[in-house]
Image (spheres, grey):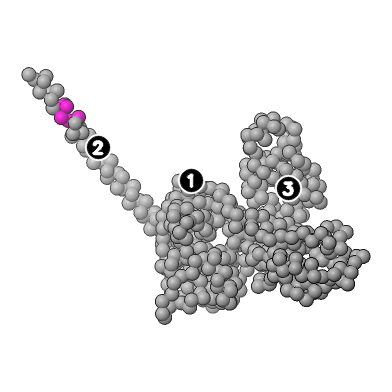
Amino acid sequence: MRPKIISFFLILLLLFNIPLISGQERMLRSETTEEVQHRASELSAAFRHASERVIPAAVKIVSRLQTTEDREAMQLQIPALKTLPGQRNPGDSAGTGILIDPKGIVLTNNHVIARAKEIEVELPDGRKYYAKKYRHDPETDLAVIWLDVPEKEDLPYAVFGDSDTMEIGDWVLAIGNPFELDSTVSAGIISAKGRLLRQVRRTEFLQTDAAINPGNSGGPLINLKGEIIGINTAILSRTGTNQGIGFALPSNNAQWVAQQIIAKGKVERAWLGVITKALTPWEIRRLELKQRNGVLVEYSLQNSPAEEAGLKEDDVILSFDGQPVNAVYQLQRLTERAKLNEEHEIIFVRAGKRYKITVDMKPMPLSVGLAGSVLGESVQSYVDTTLNLLLVQATEPMLARLRLNGRQGLIVLTTIPGGRAEKAGINVGMLIAKVDGKSVPTRNAYITARNESDLSNGITLDVVLPGGAEQKIVIKLGQ
């Protein structure tokens, strides 16, 4: 009978999932639970200490815009916040920034302060300051603001961390003012690295699931040491609010851009002059490559440093100045930061053999920067075969790059060497505002005006040079 009774109880234990554990095992389980709780408390403490370190330097930025049109355009970039009677003006836009210098230098997104007539910055402790100047870099959607701070007054500030050390799964905190909820902290992890966004082409992004909402733009993404490892810039969402996919510009990129702007008032980029693409399995087989790293050269641009150094189609660039290159954006980042008018080392593979060359890096030509602004955008272009011009309808990044904010017209992207436009003095970067006295804010307006013009009588173009100087240029038959 005893074996039957034992079997019966065993069946009951199995059916009802009753654990068979000893007193010692219970004690071990209890200890494990305590250890888990301890680790959770340690993580909470790390979140708390990192937040306390950075919150005082994370500021609210209120941009007062210039015109109704500017406000409408801004709302396309940052959803407008609903205001109640007695609160902010309907035309104001709110975002976030981070103090990076005790003398009042703030880093934020360009789209937070674009077109601002007045910029007000409020610290978490309630102190308010106005911007005395700002400079921006539309290519990375970053801007630097100098606050009007009394000389003897020091402000709290945050320090940069090394974004290259962040790995997928690392904890991060996003700090900002979503929906004007001051000094909000959200936690998440690094979800991916090296993300590319069509709207901001001169950087890669860290992807995070830390909650980022309208108003977080320009705020810091920090590690558990309380260091800036990213600037929160964009979200991917079908609702306009957080859905767990946010993008932060890596701190190593942001710090370089900020240093350039602070030191020079602009970003000076070097230029290699190659069109490259990622290696695919098919390309590896076609070229009979032994390695899978590197980027493939499609062609070198005419008169570029790359062409002068001898880089050709189907070369595979492995490294630049000793730094390995495994993605197109890595090569772009390394080359654009290279010191100008100095020689830099490139290692590449050609037809199975390894070569080493030096290249003399030059400043990026304006036409290259403008072409870069066009890539990936839905812009209206037009080839004027009679005047030998390639024109594109002006976009905000292009106008900002040319210091022509608020202008309308078509920008000269390319002139054919020896063509009518070049002979008449039309240069890359000029904005054509009028044709024979008629405004041409769009491609269709330009085409209409040109169809009504007569080259035999001369065509008068009202152009605006980078920086804002205006000029009339007449192009005649026979030029």
- Mark 2 / mark 3, whichever is N-terminal: 2
- How far apart, in angstroms, are the residues tagged by discs 2 and 3? 62 Å
- Residue 449: percent from the left, percent from the top? 77, 70
As drawn, 25 above or below 181: above
In the image: residue 287, left or right of residue 12 = right
Write down the region rendered in magenta. 10-14
Between 472 and 342, which is closer to the camera in this rendering?
472
- How far apart, in angstroms, are the residues tagged by discs 1 and 2? 32 Å
Amino acid type for the residue under numbered disc 1: Ile
* Crowding at mark 2 (Cα within 10 Å: few <14, some 14-19, many 20+): few
Is residue 411 on the magenta stretch?
A: no
As drawn, 410 above or below 294: below
- Residue 24: percent from the left, percent from the top? 20, 34
As drawn, 46 above or below 69: above
Between 26 and 118, which is closer to the camera in this rendering?
118
Amino acid type for the residue under numbered disc 2: Leu
Location of the C terminus by quadrant is bottom right
Q: Can you identify the residue that label 1 sits on?
A: 168
Q: Can you identify the residue that label 3 sits on?
A: 274
Closer mark to the observer between disc 2 and disc 3: 3
Q: Can you identify the residue that label 2 sits on?
A: 28
Dominant secondary structure of the residues highlighted in magenta in the image: helix
* Crowding at mark 3 (Cα within 10 Å: few <14, some 14-19, many 20+): many
**Residue 309 image-quadrant placement:** top right
Which numbered dot is residue 292?
A: none
